[in-house]
Image: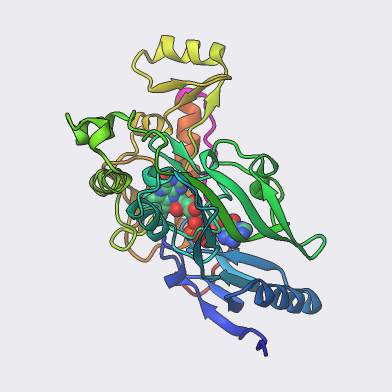
Amino acid sequence: MTQFPDIRENIELVGLNTLHVPARARFFVEVRSAEELVQSLDWAAAENYEVLILGGGSNLVFAGDFAGLVVRLAIPGRRWEHIEDQSATLVLGAGESWHESVLYAAGAGYRGIENLALIPGTAGAAPVQNIGAYGVELCDCLESVTALDRKTSELVVLNNAECRFAYRDSLFKQTPGRYVITEIRLGLSRSRPLVLGYRDLQEYLGDTPDCDLNPLQVAEAIMAIRRRKLPDPAILPNVGSFFKNPVVDVGSFESLRERHPDIVAYPQKQGVKLAAAWLIDQSGWKGFRNARVGVHNRQALVLINHSEGVGTDILELAATIRESVVKRFGVTLEMEPGIVGEPVTGHS
Ligand SMILES: Cc1cc2nc3c(=O)[nH]c(=O)nc-3n(C[C@H](O)[C@H](O)[C@H](O)COP(=O)(O)OP(=O)(O)OC[C@H]3O[C@@H](n4cnc5c(N)ncnc54)[C@H](O)[C@@H]3O)c2cc1C
C-alpha cells in the first residue's frame, strides 16, 4: 500500500540551494514517485497553497521564504531501452543526479551528453532551461519527457519538438507551473561524432586524434576544464551563469563593434550573440565583492555568496550590474536563474 507522502512544516532550505541563501518552506515534501507527486499536489490544491518544484536548487535564487508547498523531486531510476547495435535510449527518473548520469552513460561508451558533465542539478530539471555547455545542448539528444500536466492532472509524453527547445528555454519555462517532469529519455549512440570544437577543449586534448577518444575521456576533460574556470558551489556558493548571453540584431552589433572593436560575439542564425561575461567584465565587475556577495574573479558571469548573504543581496548586486551594462553598452541582460520566495525576515 502506498503511504501518503510525509509533508513537513517550516523547513530550512539553505542546504537545498547552491547559492546557500537562507529561506524557509512553509511546507516541504520529497516525492519518490509520480503517485506521491500527484498526492502532494492534490493536498496543496485542497489547502490552497502555491507549489514550488525543486530539484537540486542550482538554478534558483530564494529572495526569501516560500509560503506554500515546496515539492522536491527525488524520483529515482536509470534504465536502458531500445538497445540496438550502436544506439540506445537512456531513461532517467527526474530525481537522478544529472552529472552522475552523464558519467554512467559515458562510462558505458554512449555518446551525446559527455560535454554536459559537471552541470549540477537533477535530470528532471535539465529540460527546463535546455542545459547547454561546450557546443552541446540537451535538446540535441532528448527524445521525450514524461510530465504531469497540472492543467489536466494527467501524465503526458512530450516529444522533442513539443518541448519547444531554444537557447536556455523550453515549453517548461514558457508555461511556468504547468508541467512537472517525472522522467526523461535520451537517445544516445556509440558512433555519433564527439563534439570537440570548443577552443578550451581542443587545447586540453592537444594532439590526441579524435578516433582515440571515448566519451568518458571527453567528460573527464570537460570536468577538468570546468574545475579550472568555475567555482565549486560547495566552496563558493553560486548558481553558475547568472545572466544569459544577449542576442542583438546585426545592425546593433555593428554599431557596438564600431565603439568596442574587441567585443566578444558569436554569429547566430538570427542576430549576434554577445558574451555577457565580456560585457560585465568591461563594466568593471570581475572580482568585485562587498561584505557578503560578489562577482567571481575568473568568471564575471558568476555571482558568489561569500559570507552569509541573503537572496536579496545577490539580486541587488545583479540589478546594479545590469544597470551599469545598460549604461555602458545599451544592452539589457536577462537573468538565467528563477527567483522565488518573499523577502526573508530575521535572517540578515
Ligand atoms: C556551478 C554551476 C554551473 C552550472 N553550469 C551550467 C551550464 O554549463 N549550463 C547550463 O545550462 N546550466 C548550468 N548551471 C545551471 C543549473 O545547474 C541547471 O539549470 C540545472 O539543470 C538546474 O537543475 P536543478 O535540479 O538544480 O534545478 P532547480 O534549481 O531546483 O530548478 C530550476 C527550475 O526548474 C524547475 N524544475 C526543477 N525540477 C523540475 C521538474 N522535475 N519538473 C519541472 N520543473 C522543474 C524549478 O521549479 C525551477 O524553476 C550551472 C549551475 C551551477 C551552480
Residues drawn in magenta: 329-339
Q: In which quarter of the view is residue 300 placed?
A: top left
Q: Position of residue 26 (x, y in %)?
A: 62, 78
Q: Position of residue 222 (x, y in %)?
A: 30, 44
Q: Is residue 332 magenta?
A: yes
Q: Report the side of 155 relative to 233 (left or right).
A: right
The structure residue drawn at horizontal position 32% and vertical position 45%, both measured from the top left corner, is: 215
Q: Report the side of 79 relative to 5 (left or right).
A: left
Q: Is residue 10 above or below residue 159?
A: below
Query: Who is closer to the viewer here, 246 or 143?
Result: 143
Magenta region, main secondary structure: loop
Q: Is residue 272 visible?
A: yes
Q: Position of residue 344 (x, y in %)?
A: 54, 68
Query: Who is closer to the viewer here, 337 or 113?
Result: 113
Query: Who is closer to the viewer here, 46 or 38?
Result: 38
Q: Is residue 108 above or below residue 198?
A: below
Q: In which quarter of the view is residue 221 placed?
A: top left
Q: Report the side of 274 relative to 32 (left or right).
A: left
Q: Position of residue 133 (x, y in %)?
A: 41, 40
